[in-house]
Image: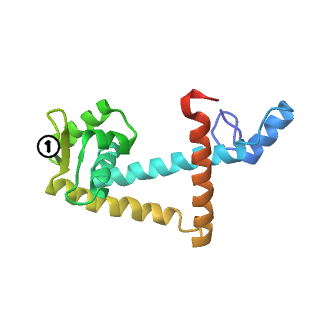
Amino acid sequence: MTDAGAPGLPGPAPSAAQITAAWRRERPGTPTESIEIVTPIWRLAKLFADDRNRVLRAAGVDAATLDLLSVIRRSGPPYTLSTRELASRTLVTAGAISQRVARAERDGFVRRAPGATGRRTVLVGLTAEGHALIERTVDAVLGRETELVSSLSAAERSVLTSLLDKLMTDVRQCTAGGES
């Protein structure tokens, strides 16, 4: 769908305010209060994701592997977590964790070992190669993302962080259990 530029050619996307105004004009009474919040969040999420993927491609790692290695690295020494802890901290299913761990193990980034609490517990730890990869990659990713938000002052970042935390909490509560 094109909203600007020559007919049939994509142009700049309309602003959230323009989208809101169009809906209010076309469908008076339609709830539009969310558009100027949700639309920029979706657009920013896409821009951040696309940029992060470019950085990750340059580093030779995919987002799922980065997520897995990051969670283990942030856990502190000895950089080992159970697969259950990994699933909980990454918000993906046990099956997805199993696939991620298998791929990372095949690539030499993690090692699996039986847990001390029972046969079914599997511990996943960083290898030296996995530790080196996450050290290099986290600096590249977080350094780039710091550049992307550098136009905001420390005070603005603090306010935005607070508002996003509040919104995240509220949205999680509203969407828990499939509520609308």
Q: Quadrant of the C terminus?
A: top right
Question: Relative to residue 89, is residue 173 drawn left or right?
Answer: right
Residue at the far bottom: name it: 154
Query: Farthest residue in the front direction?
Result: 117
Which of the 4 image quarters holds residue 104? top left
Q: Is residue 145 left or right of residue 83?
A: right
**Vertical position of residue 54 compared to residue 83: above or below:** below
Display colour scheme: rainbow
Q: What type is the residue that disc 1 sits on?
A: Ala
Q: What is the count of numbered marks?
A: 1
* Image location of residue 5, percent across then percent down: 69, 42
Horizontal and vertical percent for residue 162?
60, 59
Does the image show residue 12? no
Q: Is residue 123 visible to us here?
A: yes
At 57% from the left edge and 72% from the top edge, which residue is drawn?
154
Q: Between 62 and 95, which is closer to the camera in this rendering?
A: 95
Quarter containing the N terminus: top right
Residue identifier under label 1: 116
Residue 13 placement: quadrant: top right
Residue at the spot x=77%, y=41% of the render?
A: 20
Q: Is residue 2 left or right of residue 83?
A: right
Extreme residue toward the top, this view: 178
Q: How many other residues sit within 10 Å of disc 1, few (<14), some (14-19) or many (≥20)?
A: few
| Residue placed most toward the observer, 52 or 81 | 81
Residue shown at 56%/40% (left/top)? 172
- Judge by depth and name the residue closer to the eye, 93 or 11: 93
Q: Secondary structure at mark 1?
A: loop
Residue 94 position, x and y percent, is 31, 32
Q: Is residue 88 left or right of residue 179?
A: left
Q: Tell me residue 76's x, y (percent).
A: 27, 60
